[in-house]
Image (spheres, rainbow, N blue to C red):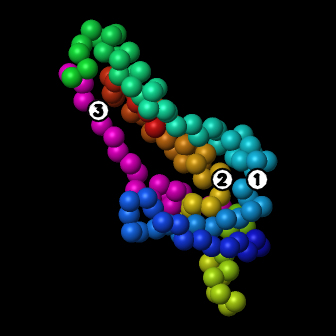
Amino acid sequence: MNLSAPHWVRKPDDDDGRFIIDPINLNTEEIKSEAIKDYGFAGLPTIGEIIYSWFDMSERLARPLNSFRIFKDDINSAFPQFKFHVASCLLLAIMITQDIIFIHLNGNFGWSGCPMVFALLGRFILNIARPLISGSLHL
């Protein structure tokens, strides 16, 4: 069992914060590489790539940019949407007090592999949405 130190991190421009763990032995470059190998790379598009795709589509369809609709959404509490395997949960235990131990069952901020796991779901969503949308998609 890994007993990690919990942290409360403030969100920018918001009074609410985020409860995270910092499992030192689960946030190494080796662990991150393993997560990438298991789940795939979690790459986010740059603002430049997104804007370039708008101009590219405008040119390909010979339509002005103001004829397009731009939509942005965010999945609220993305990481808790997936559950860890029971054997992995013990690695994410947090000692709150001497007699209280919190064990994460769902994704959380604290393990460097969570973005890769969630990106796997993102790629699945893109594969379903791509045939239905004539524009460019970024996730």
Instruction: Confirm or deny contact between disc 3 and disc 1 (CB under 8 A).
Output: no
Magenta stretch, residue numbers: 67-86
> In the rendered picture of this protein, how many numbered marks are placed on residues?
3
As drawn, the residue found furthest toward the front would be 13
Q: Which residue is mark 3?
A: 70
Q: Nearer the viewer, residue 46 or 37?
A: 46
Rounded to the nearest angstrom, the CA distance separating label 3 from label 1 is 37 Å
Q: Is residue 2 depicted above or below 129 in this figure?
A: below
SS label for mark 2: loop
As drawn, the residue found furthest toward the left would be 67
Say which quarter of the image contains residue 64: top left
Q: Residue at x 33, y 10 (%)?
A: 59
Q: Is residue 55 depicted above or below 91 in this figure?
A: above
Can residue 86 be seen in this snapshot? no
Horizontal side, residue 1 vs residue 45: left or right: right
Q: Is residue 73 magenta?
A: yes
Q: Amino acid at mark 2?
A: Ser
Q: Amino acid at mark 3?
A: Ile
Can residue 26 be seen in this snapshot? yes
Instruction: Confirm or deny contact between disc 1 and disc 2 (CB under 8 A).
Output: yes
Q: Is residue 51 depicted above or below 7 in this figure?
A: above
Q: Which mark is residue 112?
A: 2
Near mark 3 (Cα within 10 A), the count class, few <14, some 14-19 or many ≥20, is few
Task: State which tag comes first along the sequence, 1 or 2.
Answer: 1
Q: Residue at x 51, y 44 (%)?
A: 121
Task: State which tag comes first along the sequence, 3 or 1.
Answer: 1
Q: Is residue 113 magenta?
A: no
Near mark 1 (Cα within 10 A), the count class, few <14, some 14-19 or many ≥20, is few
Q: Residue at x 55, y 43 (%)?
A: 119
